[in-house]
Amino acid sequence: MSFAHTPQVALVGNPNTGKTTLFNALTGLRHKVGNYPGVTVERKVGALQAGEFQTELVDLPGIYSLAAHSPDEMVAVDTIAWAHEFTQRPADLLLVILDASNLRRNLYLYSQLLEARRPIVVALTMLDVAESTGVKVDVDKLRERLRVPVVPVHAKKGVGIQELKDTIGQHLAHIAAQGHEAHLPPAHTVHTDAVYDALAQLGESFEAAGAPAPPDFVRLRMILDEDSYLLHMVDDATAQAVRPTIASLRKLLSAQRALPAIEAHARYTWITDLLAGVVEKPEKRVETHSDRIDDIITHRVWGAVIFVLIMTAIFQAIFTWSTPLMDFIETGLPMMLGDKVRASMAPGALSSLLADGIIGGVGGVLVFVPQIFVLFLFIAILEDCGYMARAAVLVDKLMSKIGLSGTSFIPMLSGFACAIPAIMSAQTIADKKDRMATILVIPLMSCSARLPIYVLLISAFVPATYVAGFLSLQSLVLMGMYAIGLVVAIPVAFLLKRTVLKGPSPTFVMELPSYKWPDPKTVLLSAWGQAKAFLVNAGTVILAVSIVVWALAYFPRSEDRNLEFETARQEVLAQNLSEEAEEEALHEVNAAEEAANINASFLAQMGKAVEPVFSPLGWDWKLSMSVLASFPAREIIIATLGTIYSVGSDADEESEGLRHALQQSTHPDGSPVFTIPVALSVMVFFALCMQCFATLAIMKKVTGTWKWPAFAFFYMTVLAYIGALLTSRIGSLFL
Amino acid sequence: MAAAATTMSSHAQARKLSALKPGEVGVIERLRGRGYIVQRLYEMGLLEGHRVEMVRHAPFGGPVEICICDYHLSLRRDEADLVEIT
């Protein structure tokens, strides 16, 4: 017998066990990230060459238990062995990670996995951490007791990786030859007879309803987990039919002890027996370096100081490192390319489309990729080294005041990079109302797509001076922009949790993993993955909008107007001026022509129609149109400004860039459009506004209705307008 | 004698987990309440008869950090109070 398909290996384990690092070590750079159908749980698949087999390694979400209280756990249960909705067939092999420094708790999930009746290979991680806490693990004895292959690994150093691959390969070869059944781990019967009887009864109940009974381990979850997601996965009629059975079984079983206690005691008793003689612990807990770090990091004063310092350092770095890139964007690539196109092509619509529409538009956005990469890099480092969990603890009290918990803080912080992965990571929040409130305020966090407009306007209009000698004023304003979203999110969440999402105060239970040095590969891959998503967006949505905006700004062209300016040019040439004077005169004619063209364009007509809405903010029609055009994706603003201003600029003159163009732009009366209050009001508008179709789409997917995304869109747009109005009005009183 | 008796009786009496001082160790007597959160506590290894050590109290009445089954867990006081220890 051999596999009729590519063998599938599922990587399962608790959070904080080095799962991602192991996944990367096993698959290298060859992996794909997608979504499970119908749910917003990330599906990460990599190619794993194990012995003679080319296999698919599926990285399941990190979970503590198969009890399915969140979409993550639901997907895990299905992929492991049910194969009911999210996967075609059960995994051929489970690669289970066990953290040697924390075997007891890790074996809890393992004991649930044993009931799924699939072949298992164990990767034992964190042996070095165990050793540092004085815990000795007898690996041979563990292997003997579990009676499955156990391979110690240190993924960061590459130790044990080849052996693990070989072991998986050998195991798959046996499975291919003799079938899955012949290579199952030994069955363990940890539960009482009453529980097994209940399982059988529920099985009968399914059959009586005319539906195939789900596997034992799934039925066990249906009985033991109140509010289980799994029952939603069978059709309504069947669920309706088996519900009374489940209710009576629960009542029967919980006569002596609460349901969750029954399972936990059964499993932990088994674990205690299994580990006797395998793990040797010191009498008293050894103080580790993690403890010593935590004495400072979670200290009432130092903890807060370090939190602020870390956040400040991130923003300072982004701004300082971005300066050379800003210079590059203005004198560099896009302009060079644009000029090349103009020089080598006959002037006309096509040349203008390429130079102004595409290069001026998309090019401007692309240059921000390095900064976005840097931001993601910092978030990935903080997550990988274990700081994020501490940050969640530090802010939990504060979050509880607004009706959320520290658990919501991590998705919210990821929201500073991008709302989409942030909303996805909010899926791990168990309570529906907390999850919803978190998802609704995530888009207020200043994501990386807002960074370009902040950087552009700050570098153009905020003086590059230093406060207190070393803090750059520009980066302080940048931090202020990031703070606005956070500050506004507080009353919004507070109101949501007291009105539409009223519910009990959320719970907060979070593991504090040992600190470790971040793994460069894991961190870089994570940051690159996010930057790539931004690039893909730039190549599709932004490109499309850039072309539309360009077309609206370029057309209609009139023959009469062309002729008029052509005549003017001929007149200049006929005057026999000195070369210098002639060039200057021609330049004037060209500038007048471009101004006439753009003022007659569709874009100008539309802009002038909406101008009254935005004129209270001090915005002109060009700015108003640019902002409106960036509702599909906010980073489009750079492209739109680039397009509008390069269409309106003289192509022959050496361009000094968008920053310069914005500084020079004036109202019809000659006063500058971009005063400091106007620049600030634009930034505030962007900070608060929901300009991202992708976020709305993912909200729809997560909540299952357009009601919530529509609500988010409405409240944020209103907030943005009011915020911008206040900034502009109050700012002009002082500045 | 009287002082000793008081100590004895307070030992036998269940107290809440959050009442432990940093460095103090207790044995879990029972978990109150029901539903998801209690199940999660059980799964994480907080079950009757197990030892639990208080590591630290977060500042400003924030969550408490405990050590159980060799790892550190942070939980809000409300959740910690579901756990009774002796």
Image (tube, coloured by chain):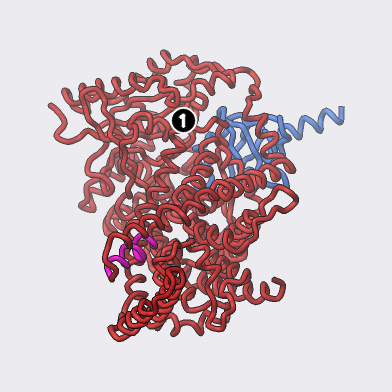
Please name the color used to draw chain B: blue
**Front residue of this view, candidates A184 and A610:** A610
Residue A152 lies left or right of residue A186; in this view the side is right
Choose top left, top right, bottom left or bottom right for residue A199: top left
SS label for mark 1: helix
Task: Inspect this view and state whether residue A89 appears.
Answer: yes
Which chain is disc 1 placed on?
A
Q: Is A406 one of the magenta-colored residues?
A: no
Q: In the rendered image, what is the letter of the chain coloured red?
A: A
Residue A2 is left or right of residue A437, and the answer is left
Q: Quadrant of residue A596?
A: bottom left
**Identity of the residue drawn at 22% across and 30% down:** A54
* Magenta-highlighted residues: A349-361
Outermost residue toward the left in this view: A1
Residue A319 placed where, x, y %? 57, 50
- The residue located at (50%, 67%) in the rendering is A661
Mark 1 nearby-residue class (10 Å; few <14, some 14–19, many ≥20): many
**How many numbered markers are drawn?**
1
Task: Look at the picture and state if A721 lies above or below A543.
Answer: below
Up the image or down, A112 lies above or below A213; here it is above
Most foreground residue, A26 or A678: A678
**Residue tagged 1:** A106
Measured along the vertical axis of the image, is residue A641 above or below residue B45?
Answer: below
Coordinates of residue A323 in the picture (x, y in percent): 55, 50
Q: Is residue A268 above or below residue A378?
A: above
Q: Position of residue A396 (x, y in %)?
A: 63, 49
Image spot of residue A161 (x, y percent): 36, 22
Q: Identity of the amino acid at label 1?
A: Asn
Figure quadrant of the C terminus of chain A: bottom right
Residue A223 visible in the picture: no
Q: Quadrant of the N terminus of chain A?
A: top left
- For the stretch drawn in magenta, the main secondary structure is helix
